[in-house]
Amino acid sequence: MARAAVQRRLTWLPARLVATSAESPRVHRLVFDVPGWSGHLPGQHVDVRLTAEDGYTAERSYSLASPPEVGELHLLVERLEDGEVSSYLTGELSPGDLIELRGPIGGYFVWSAAADQDDRDTGRRPVQLVAGGAGVSPFTAMLDHHRRRESPTPMQLLYSTRDESEILARGLLGPETTITLTRDVPVGWAGETGRVDAAMLLRCTVKPGDSPRIFVCGPTAFAESTATALVDLGHEPTSIRIERFGESKEPS
Amino acid sequence: MSVLSRGFGRARTRPADDRLPPGQYDVGNSFPVLSAGPTPHTPLARWDFGIDDEGGELRRWSWEEFQALPREAVTVDIHCVTKWSKFDTRWEGVAIDTLLRDVPTTASHVLASCDGGYTTNMPLPDLVNGRAWVVDTFEGQPLAPEHGGPARLLVPHLYFWKSAKWLRRLTLAHHDQPGFWETFGYHIYGDPWREQRYSGD
C-alpha cells in the first residue's frame, strides 16, 4: 500500500531577497527570507513565480541549496541564455525585492538524518552523491545538513565541473568530496580530471557491495550516462535516484 | 493578490500563446528528459504489455502482437509539471480504446505500471474515447529509451508525468490508488489547464 501523502496545500509565499552574490561566473547565490516557510528536507525544491506589471507570469523550479537548519532559503541560480527567469533573478533582482515562492516540492530525491535514524536498515547504507555542474545544488543542502546534524551515515560526493572557477559552495566541500575538472585543469591540480565514466566511478565512489543509496543530479546527458554506468557496475537500479535538468533553456 | 516583480517582463518579445496552460513556457525544439531513476533497457523479445484487474490478467500482447494492432497517428501538445510545454508533437501507436475493445469492465480507475517500478494513476474515462494511446513512435522514429521506449503511455490532456514511460501494464480498478509521484505530493489528477501540479491545487 502506498504511503500516506502529505495532503497540504502549497500556497504562494512572498519571499524577500536579503542577499545575492556571484558564486561563479554564471551562478548566483540568492538568499531569501520567507515568512511562514514550513520547513523542508535536503533535496527538495521550490517553485518561483515572477509577475510582470501587465499580469504576465513565469514559473520555474529550483532546488534548495540550504539545509532546514538555516532560517533563510538559499538558491543557486545559473544564468542561462534566453532564460527570462534566471536572467532576471541573477541580473535585476536586488536585496529588498519581493518574489513569490512555494514548496517544499518533491519527496523522493531527499536525504535526511532523521529518516536514517527512523529506518536503521536503510540508514546503515552509505550515501553516494554524484553531481554535474549546477546539479550540486541539492547536495549542498544534504552535505550541510549532514554536518550540522553530525550524522553517522557515510556520505561522499563526486562533483564534475568544467573548471576551478565554476566550483560552487566551495567553503562547504570537505574530505568527503572528490572534484573532477572536465575542461581547464590548473597546474598542480590534485583532484580528478575528465568526464565521469565507469572507471572514475569505480575509483571514486562507494562500491556496489556496500549497497549505497545513490543520488545523481545534473544535465540530462550527464545523468543518463552516469546512471547507465552505475547500473553496469552492478548497482541496483532502484538504489539510484536521479534529478535531471533537461535540455530546456531553464532548469526543470 | 500577487507580488509584482519590478521590471520583470520588459524584454519579453513573444506574445502569450493561448496554447500554453498557466505557469508553462514553450520549450521549442528541445525535448527535456525527466525520470526518477535509471533508464531501463528491456529487449523487445522480453517486452510484453498487459491489461489486468483485481482478478488477474485479462489481455496480453507480445511486441509482435502489439505491432499487428490497428495504429493511429496523433499530433498533440504536451505539458510537463516542471513547467515546459511542447507543441505539435507527433506520435504513433495504439489507442487505449483499441486495447480495451474486448475487455468488458466496470472499473472506474487505472494504475499504469512500468519497467523500473514507476506507477501513475488516472480515472478510466481519461484513457478512452480517443484521449490516450500506447505509443512506440515519436516524430517518425522508434521511441528512444530515454523518452520511454519501447513504448509509453500518451495522455496529452494531463501533465506529462501521467504519460508513463516504459509502460508494461494497465491495471483496472474500482478505486483510485495514488501512483509514484502522486504519493510524493503531486496532484492526484493533474489537469494542466487548472494548474493541478501539487496536492491541494
Image (spheres, rainbow, N blue to C red):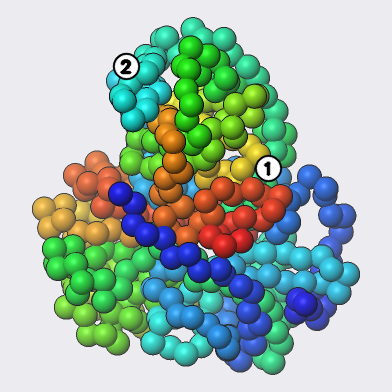
Q: Position of residue A210 (x, y in %)?
A: 12, 58
**Front residue of B34 and B97:** B97
Q: Which chain does the residue under circle 1 lie in?
A: B
Q: Is B12 on the left or on the right of A173, as rendered? A: right
Please tell me which residue is depicted at 35% across the width and 74% down the height of the picture: A142
In the rendered structure, the answer to whether residue A231 lies left or right of residue A56 reads: left
Residue B48 position (above or below residue A37): above
Horizontal side of A85 relative to A123 (left or right) equals right
Same-subunit check for callouts 1 and 2? yes
Q: Residue A160 placed where, x, y %?
A: 39, 63
In the picture as drawn, the residue positioned furthest to the left comes out as A209
Q: Which residue is mark 1?
A: B86
- Decide: is A238 above or below A145: above
Q: Where is residue A63 drawn, in percent x and y? A: 49, 69
On the question of residue B71 being in view, the answer is: yes
Residue drawn at 41 percent across, 10 percent down? B64
Quarter of the picture holding the N terminus of chain B: bottom right
**Gap in Å between the C-alphas at discs 1 and 2?**
32 Å
Location of mark 2 (residue) = B45
Q: Residue A120, how many percent across, how many down?
A: 14, 68
Quadrant of image for the C terminus of chain B: bottom right
**Is A4 positioned to the left or the right of B73 in the image?**
left
Which amino acid, mark 1? Lys
For the point 33% across and 40% down, the residue is: B116
For the question of whether residue B138 can be seen, the reply is no
* Residue contact between numbered discs 1 and 2, judged by CB atoms under 8 Å: no
Between residues A197 and A67, which one lies in front from this camera angle?
Answer: A67
> What label does residue B178 carry, if any?
none
Return the chain for callout 2: B
Kindly indicate the quadrant of the structure image that contains residue B74: top right
* Residue kind at label 2, given as amino acid type: Ala
